[in-house]
């Protein structure tokens, strides 16, 4: 059976993250108002000291990216900012597998809740997060003025 693992995104591997991000033009259009992102934009998002940015790997193949904030200073909760699978690998269940491995790791670290923000217009993502147990709790406005539905999951 194929195995999912995580690997930190670095400056040297950023070009792979850019390829994964740009394989999802519909998301980029919703989130950033354009279908393609630049290396500089992706660097700003993934190479920083606030969030943990990781590749999702299937055996030795990079199939996705994940970015999370271990502790949001505004509400004292961890927030999963992005879980994206490369377009070529979507609809095989890899996103769910990756999420549940991530969740298990968070439980082992003693976390009790994970929060996410999903663009109001991103119906596919909303369905995905509800399917893995997240529940809506409010709508907010993101840093780039998008309406975002906020969800959380209580971890047991």
Image: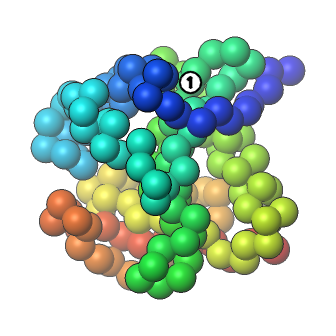
Q: Residues within 10 Å of mark 1 (few under 14, many from 20)?
A: many
Q: Is residue 135 visible?
A: no
Quadrant position of the N terminus in the picture: top right
Task: Please give left or right for residue 118 compared with residue 79 in the image.
Answer: left
Left or right of residue 16: residue 60: right
Residue under label 1, please give it.
Answer: 63
Please report the residue visible at 36 percent of the width from the left and 26 percent of the height from the top. 18
| Residue closest to the eye, 74 or 135 | 74
Q: Residue sitting at 18 percent across and 60 percent down? A: 144
Q: Residue at x 50, y 31 (%)?
A: 10
State the image coordinates of residue 51 (x, y, percent, origin top left).
Answer: 49, 55
Q: Is residue 74 above or below residue 17?
A: below
**Count of marks placed on residues:** 1
Could you say where residue 120 lies in the image, as x and y percent from the top left? 29, 62
**Can residue 156 be seen by looking at this rendering?**
yes
Q: Is residue 9 above or below residue 109?
A: above
Question: On the picture, is 97 further left or further right than 15?
Answer: right
Quadrant position of residue 34? top left
**Percent coordinates x, y for residue 153 in the rendering:** 63, 72
Q: Residue at x 58, y 21 (%)?
A: 62
Q: Position of residue 121 (x, y in %)?
A: 27, 56
> On the image, which quarter does residue 21 sit in?
top left
Q: Is residue 39 left or right of residue 67?
A: left
Vertical side of 10 occupied by 2: above or below: above
In the picture, which quadrant includes the C terminus?
bottom right
Colour scheme of the rendered structure: rainbow
In the image, residue 112 sits, relative to residue 36, either above or below, namely below
Secondary structure, mark 1, is strand
């Amino acid at each position: 059976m194929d195995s999912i693992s995580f690997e930190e995104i670095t400056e040297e591997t950023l070009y792979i993250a850019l390829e994964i991000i740009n394989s999802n033009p519909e998301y980029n259009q919703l989130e950033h108002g354009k279908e393609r992102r630049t290396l500089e934009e992706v660097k700003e998002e993934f190479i920083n000291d606030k969030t943990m940015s990781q590749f999702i790997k299937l055996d030795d193949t990079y199939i996705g990216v994940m970015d999370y904030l271990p502790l949001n200073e505004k509400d004292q909760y961890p927030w999963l900012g992005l879980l994206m699978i490369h377009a070529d690998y979507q609809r095989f269940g890899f996103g769910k597998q990756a999420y549940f491995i991530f969740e298990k790791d968070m439980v082992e670290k003693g976390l009790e809740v994970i929060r996410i923000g999903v663009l109001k217009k991103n119906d596919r993502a909303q369905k995905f997060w509800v399917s893995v147990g997240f529940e809506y709790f409010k709508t907010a406005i993101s840093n780039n003025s998008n309406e975002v539905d906020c969800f959380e999951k209580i971890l047991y």
